Image (cartoon, grey):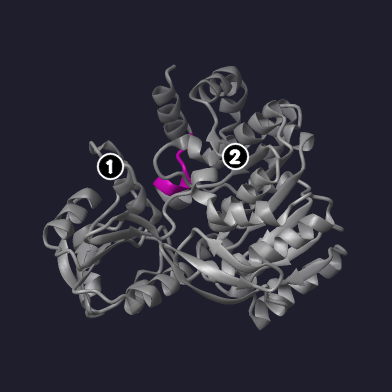
Amino acid sequence: MTYDETVTYLFNCAPPFQQVGGAAYKEGLSTTLALDRHLGHPHRKFPTIHIAGTNGKGSTSHTIAAILQESGYKVGLYTSPHLIDFRERIRVNGIPASKEYVVDFVGKHKEFFEPLSPSFFELTTAMAFSFFAEQEVDVAVIETGLGGRLDCTNIITPKLSIITNISLDHTQFLGNTVEEIAAEKAGIIKAGIPVVIGEATEATRTVFKKKASEVYAPISFAEDKPEITHSEPRGNGYEYTAERYGKLHGELGGYCQEKNANTILAAIEKLKEQGFAISENALRKGFTNVCSLTGLMGRWQKLMENPIAVCDAGHNIGGIKYIAEQLEAIRCDRLRIVFGMVSDKDIAAVLSMMPKNAEYYFTQAGIKRAMPAEELKEKAVRFGLEGNAYPTVHAAFRAALAESGNDDFIFVGGSCFVVADLLAALQKEQGWTG
């Protein structure tokens, strides 16, 4: 099979959650353990850092990987979902796994895994662990997919566990309260392994402390002794004032990044305690160059100037809260929002937070889970959000661009799949460099 045929096979053989939603969810670790045995337990061949949470996993994972790369380590990075190319999920020092590796892995092992009927994420996780072992990485940063306790990444015993935050998302699988969701995320806390909690409420703090106490895991809360004392926008990113480092430039934009930066700095100190050699210079370079070092996309990513166009992959209540606040603060002639969501999110809660002083371009990503643009438009009217519906993200973006003056501001988001569709379309357009 060619690479494209192999990826199509993976999507058809084990459809990813991003495509079909709950039908792709598979509880339990039995299949993961069977794949791991078959592959010779590759995850035992390199140290790991395990990251869970409702929001901020991607920014936190990529920045920590960037800092470790700048410190001279060969770093594996496993994240999800991908935006344009499947191989974005599996990287070493920012470079995706080769197409040949993906093809060879499936060809070599499909006779074994087909009878197991693994989920897409189970199969991808096994591929990532095998690739990192083959590449002899010094350390791998592993992001959970959904939850923690029963997430198939949870067979690892990391050097450090990180839980970024908790909000209501994937309630059909993880629970209907923040306490229930926190209990699932807390499943990555391992016996004797330090854990850093980025953000916590009184309710979730109790859950995390109880779990850590049960397994004698040293626990620290980044908010209790915040490293970041001040932040302000600089270019498309932020300039932070950090307790230990003074002025620190972060490449990533978005209001949420101050919380993420605080979590990252707390985690870096724990990694130093675990014996990782991380210099201040490496930390600064990691924060400043995270996108070029790791290939991160879709975090308040500026697409163009005149008019300014930005996309962000935030897609649930916790993520949209920060985006909505940031959009409300923008000063421009006209705010234009290209917006789409998937049907299994809390649509009403998200729409209730979105700015009313904007022109909306309702759209839908090219996946089964996408809410039809016309239906989203009808729901939005109830919240005072007005605009037209477009059948594709690219069509919606082009309409917004055609109607914009140089001093307007275009935002694209509501779903990581909306962002993915736009980035893929722009990549195909001659002359677009991102």
Compute the Cα span from label 2 to label 1.
35 Å
- The magenta stretch is 14-19
Q: Amino acid at mark 2?
A: Glu
Horizontal arrangement in the rendering, residue 398 relative to residue 46 (left or right): left
User: Horizontal and vertical percent for residue 136?
Assistant: 72, 30
Q: Residue at x 46, y 67 (%)?
A: 319
Q: Amino acid at mark 1?
A: Trp
Report the residue marked by disc 2: 122
Report the residue marked by disc 1: 432
Residue 74, picture quadrant? top right
Measured along the vertical axis of the image, is residue 163 above or below residue 154?
below
Horizontal arrangement in the rendering, residue 96 relative to residue 207 (left or right): left
Measured along the vertical axis of the image, is residue 130 above or below residue 121?
above
| Secondary element at image label 2 | helix
Q: Residue furthest bottom?
A: 202
Between 116 and 52, the residue placed more toward the observer is 52
User: Horizontal and vertical percent for residue 413?
Assistant: 34, 60
Q: Is there any visible trace of residue 31 in the rendered image?
A: yes
Mark 1 surroundings within 10 Å by alpha-carbon count, few (fewer than 14), some (14 through 19), many (20 or more):
few
Between 257 and 58, the residue placed more toward the observer is 257
